[in-house]
Amino acid sequence: MKMFIYRYLPILLILLAISPAHAEDMRELQIQAAEALLQKAAAEKESALEQAASSMAAITRDRDALEQAIRKSESAIKNLTKEIHTLQAKEMALEKQEKELADKLATSDSVVRELVGVIRVNAKDIDALIARNPQTALASDGNEEQTGFLADIAGQSLFPGMEDIDRMIEMVRAQIRTSGTVQLTRGPIIDRAGNTVTADLLIIGNFTAAYRSGDEVGFLNYSPAGRKLFALSKLPPSRLQKQLKSYMAGKSEAVPMDITRGGALSRLTHELSLWEQIPKGGMLIWPILAILVVGVLIVIERVIFLVRRRMDGDELTRSIESFALAQDWASCKKACARMIGKPVARVMAAGIECCHMQRESMENALQEAILREVPVMERFLSTLGMLAAIAPLLGLLGTVTGMIDTFQVITLHGTGDPRMMSGGISEALVTTMLGLSVAIPIMLAHTLLNREVDKRIGQMEEKAVALVNIVFKSRDVNP
C-alpha cells in the first residue's frame, strides 16, 4: 500500500492543482482514475501476494531441501569422520608395521652385509691359502680356473651364493686334507744358480718343501706368482741336511720342517754369521779382536803352565814323612828333586834344607819359598783382568761413535730412509756385542785361573805346615 501511495501521489497532487471549472469533471475522472488505480493496486497487491506466497513456498522448499542436504551432509560428515578415524587407526597400524618391517629389514640387511663381508674375507684367505700351498706347484693348470671365483668374491665383483659357499667349504676341506699329506716325487725347481733342474721333491703338507739334487740337499721356497719352487740361496746346517737325507731315503721318521711357511727359512737365508757381522762394527772392532787374541794366548799359556805343574802333594808328603821319621834327609831331598819342576816340591825342598832350624825360622823359610812361587803362578792374571775390563768399554765407545754417526745422518738427510741410518746402528750394536762377547769369556777364564792359583797357593801353604809338623815330630821320635 505504501508503494502505491508513493507511486501515485504526484498524480493526485497535479489533479488537485487543476482549476475549479474543471473540478466536476475532474472529480469524476479522479474517481475513475482512483478506482483504476485501486484496481491496479489491488491487482498488483494480489500479484505481489502471489509472488510472495510463491517466494515463500520456494523459500520453504529450499529451506527444507537445504535442511535435508544439511542433515545428509552431517550424516556424511559423521560417516567420513568415522571412516577417517578408522583410516587413521589403519594408518598408525601400518606405520607401526612398516617400522617393524624396516627394523627387521635393517637387521637382516646388517646381518647379510656382515655375512657377505665374512664370506669375502674368507674367500680372500682361502685364495691366499691355496696360492701359498707348495703342493699347488704340482697341481694341474685347471686349479687356477677352479679358484678364479674366489678372487671375484673377494674383489666384490661377484655376490656369493650358496653354491659358491659350498665350493669354498669343499676347498677348505681339500686344503685340510693336503695339509696332512707328505709327498715324495720328482719335479722341476730353480736351483741356487738360477737354472731349472729336475730334483727329488719332499713336500710336507702346506708348510715345508725340500729337494735333493745329487749330493745337495736343501729347502725350497714357493713363489705363488710363478707357481715355481726356488732353492734357498743358503744351504741349511749339515745336521739338518743329514736329517733330510735320512728321511727322504726312508731311514728316519723325523724330519725338520718350517711351520711358519717360509718365515724361518727366509730368516735362515738372511742370517749373518759372526764373521760376517764383524766388518760392520767399524774401526774399533780390531782393538777388541786384538784383546781377544791376547786374552786367548794368555789363557792358553796359563792353562798349560798350571797343568804342567800339577802334582799329587799328598803322595810326596807321605814319602817325606816316612824318610823323615827314619832321619833319612838325603832321601827326602832326592824325593823332592825328582819333582823339582813343581812348585810344591820346590817349597818342600826349601823346607828340608832348613830342617835343622827352629820352628819359627823354618816357617819363615817356607813362607819365603812360597812367596817366590806366587808371582810366577799369578803372572799375566792381572793383565787378563784388565783386558776383560777394557773390552766392554771399547764396545761402549763403538756404540757412542755409531750413534753419533747415526745422528749426523739424521741431521743431514732426515729419517725418510732408514737404510741410511743402518750403518751407524750396525756399528753401535756390533761393537757392543763383540765387546761383551770378548769380555765375558775372558772374565770367566780370569776367575777360574785365579781360583786355581789360589788353590795351588793354599796347597803349598798346607804342605809347608805339614812339613814343619813332620820335621818336629821326627825330632820327638829321634831325640
Image (tube, grey):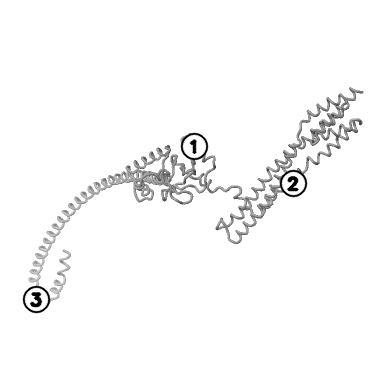
Seen from the viewer's position, the closer of residues 348 and 418 is 348
Q: Is residue 12 above or below residue 440?
A: below
Q: Quadrant of the C terminus?
A: top right
Marks 2/3: CA–CA distance: 180 Å
Give the residue number, with chain letter if any, for mark 2: 386
Position of residue 31 in the picture relative to residue 81 (left or right): left
Marks 1/3: CA–CA distance: 173 Å
Residue 159 coordinates in the image, percent (x, y)? 34, 48
Q: Residues within 10 Å of mark 2 (few under 14, many from 20)?
A: some
Marks 1/2: CA–CA distance: 50 Å
Q: Is residue 154 above or below residue 353?
A: below
* Type of amino acid at the residue the image marks with label 1: Ser
Residue at 75% x, 46% y: name it.
383
Q: Quadrant of residue 30?
A: bottom left
Seen from the viewer's position, the closer of residues 131 and 248 is 248
Residue 374 coordinates in the image, percent (x, y)? 81, 39
Of mark 1 and mark 3, the one earlier in the sequence is 3
* Type of amino acid at the residue the image marks with label 3: His
* Type of amino acid at the residue the image marks with label 2: Met
Q: Quadrant of residue 201?
A: top left
SS type, badge 1: helix
Please identify, in this view, whether the residue under mark 2 or under mark 3 is nearer the observer: 2
Q: Which mark is residue 22?
A: 3
Please identify, in this view, whether the residue under mark 1 or under mark 3 is nearer the observer: 1
Q: Quadrant of the N terminus?
A: bottom left
Of mark 1 and mark 2, the one earlier in the sequence is 1
Q: Which mark is residue 246?
A: 1
